Image (cartoon, grey):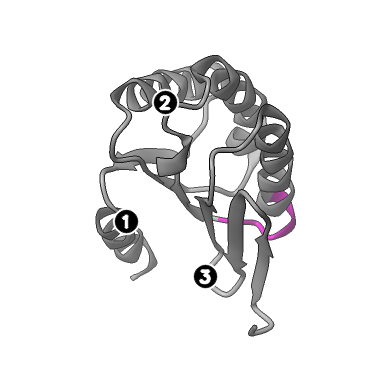
Amino acid sequence: MPDHIYEVTNSYLHLYVDTDVKLMYTDWLSLPSSAEYREAAALFVQNLQVYAVENWVMDSNRLAGFSLAEQRQVIAQLAPTIAASSLKKVARIISQDIHNRAMFEEMVKDLKNKHQAQVEIKQFWTYNEAAHWITLILA
């Protein structure tokens, strides 16, 4: 692994940070337990802060069916860190769960209103759409 790549993989999550372009990528490998979801959120916070991440691509497809209440709680905990971080753009990939997409949109509005967050957050149906958007950012 090159020196500019930091990577963590466990049974439910793959995360890597490319420190050269300040990009974090997260992919749920399986549906996490509540404890695993909270543990991952702590890992996200740590990496956002340590590596001054500016762009984050998160594949949330395997979160379909995960408790919306649990997601709301964890996102609410992440919100202040995201608002205070160097994050500029977040591309979220979720292709099947309409309720999850709607909940996330609601949380994004709340994040921006409560924390005056400047980060731009968009949801995408496919990885290619998200990657294209991020590529435009990095160009």
Q: Which residue appears at 74% of the width and 39% of the height?
A: 39
**Residue 77, above or below 60:** above
Tell me how far mark 3 sits from mark 1, CA to CA: 18 Å
Helix, strand, or loop for circle 2?
helix
Residue 12 or residue 38, whichever sits in front: 12
Circles 3, 2 touching at the beta carbon (< 8 Å): no
Tell me the residue that label 3 is attached to: 21
Q: Is residue 60 visible?
A: no
Residue 54: horizontal and vertical position, in percent? 53, 55
Taking the magenta stretch, the answer to whether it contains residue 52 is yes
Circles 3, 1 touching at the beta carbon (< 8 Å): no
Tell me how far mark 3 sits from mark 2, CA to CA: 26 Å
Q: Is residue 32 visible?
A: yes
Q: Amino acid at mark 2?
A: Phe
Q: Quadrant of residue 6?
A: bottom right
The answer to whether residue 11 is left or right of residue 128 is right
Circles 1, 2 touching at the beta carbon (< 8 Å): no
Give the main secondary structure, helix, strand or loop, of the magenta stretch. Answer: loop
Q: Callout 1 environment at 10 Å: few (<14), some (14 to 19), or many (20+)? A: some
Of the residues tagged 3 and 1, which is closer to the observer? 1
Q: Which residue appears at 47% of the width and 24% of the height?
A: 112
Looking at the image, tell me whether mark 3 or mark 1 is earlier in sequence order. 3
Tell me the residue that label 2 is attached to: 104
The answer to whether residue 107 is left or right of residue 126 is right
Tell me how far mark 1 sits from mark 2, CA to CA: 17 Å
Q: Amino acid at mark 1?
A: Tyr
Tell me the residue that label 1 is attached to: 127
Q: Amino acid at mark 3?
A: Val
Looking at the image, tell me whether mark 1 or mark 2 is earlier in sequence order. 2
Of the residues tagged 3 and 2, which is closer to the observer? 2
- Look at the image and give the residue range highlighted in magenta: 49-53
